Amino acid sequence: MSRNDTGCGLAERLESARMTARQHADGGSCFHCTSDGCEQNAWAQQELTQHARRTPAPSEND
Ligand SMILES: [Zn+2]
């Protein structure tokens, strides 16, 4: 079950997705990671990819 599916605004979801992607970018992991991969990271990449098709990619300036 994921609480990402309901109750969150787009901006909040994207912020969460960006944080998750950043966590994994350095070869890191999160508490959702398993030996089979990471559903949380898969979700994050999907969110960011979908959003990137509609608007310019978010910068890393902040
Ligand atoms: Zn993970």
Image: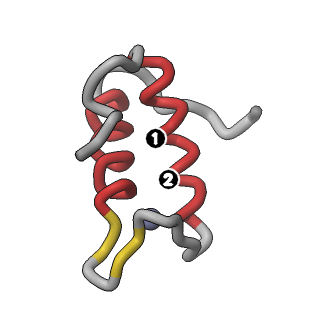
Say whether residue 61 is left or right of residue 14.
Answer: right
Q: Which mark is residue 17?
A: 1
Assess mark 1: CB under 8 A from ligand 1? no
In the displayed structure, would residue 32 be above or below residue 40?
below
x and y, in percent, of residue 49 in the image: 31, 40
Q: How many marks?
A: 2
The answer to which image quadrant residue 15 occupies is top right
Q: Nearer the viewer, residue 61 or 29?
A: 29
Residue at figure coordinates x 28%, y 42% from the top left: 2
Residue lying at the far right in this picture: please name it: 62
Q: Is mark 2 within 8 Å of ligand 1?
A: no
Percent x, y of residue 26: 61, 70
Q: Secondary structure at mark 2?
A: helix
Q: Which residue is mark 2?
A: 21
Question: Are the two marked residues, 1 and 2, in contact with CB atoms closer than 8 angstroms?
Answer: yes
Ligand 1 - quadrant of the structure image: bottom left
Q: Residue at x 33, y 35 (%)?
A: 3
Per the rendering, the mark at residue 62 is none
* Drawn side of residue 33 relative to residue 61, left or right: left
Is 42 above or below relative to 29? above
Within 10 Å of the Cα at label 1, are there few (<14), some (14-19), or many (20+) other Cα atoms?
A: many
Q: Is residue 44 left or right of residue 25?
A: left
Q: Measuring 52% from the left and 65% from the top, which residue is drawn there? A: 30
Residue nearest the viewer, comparing 51 with 3 = 3
Q: Amino acid at mark 1?
A: Ala
Q: Is residue 36 shown above or below 26?
A: below
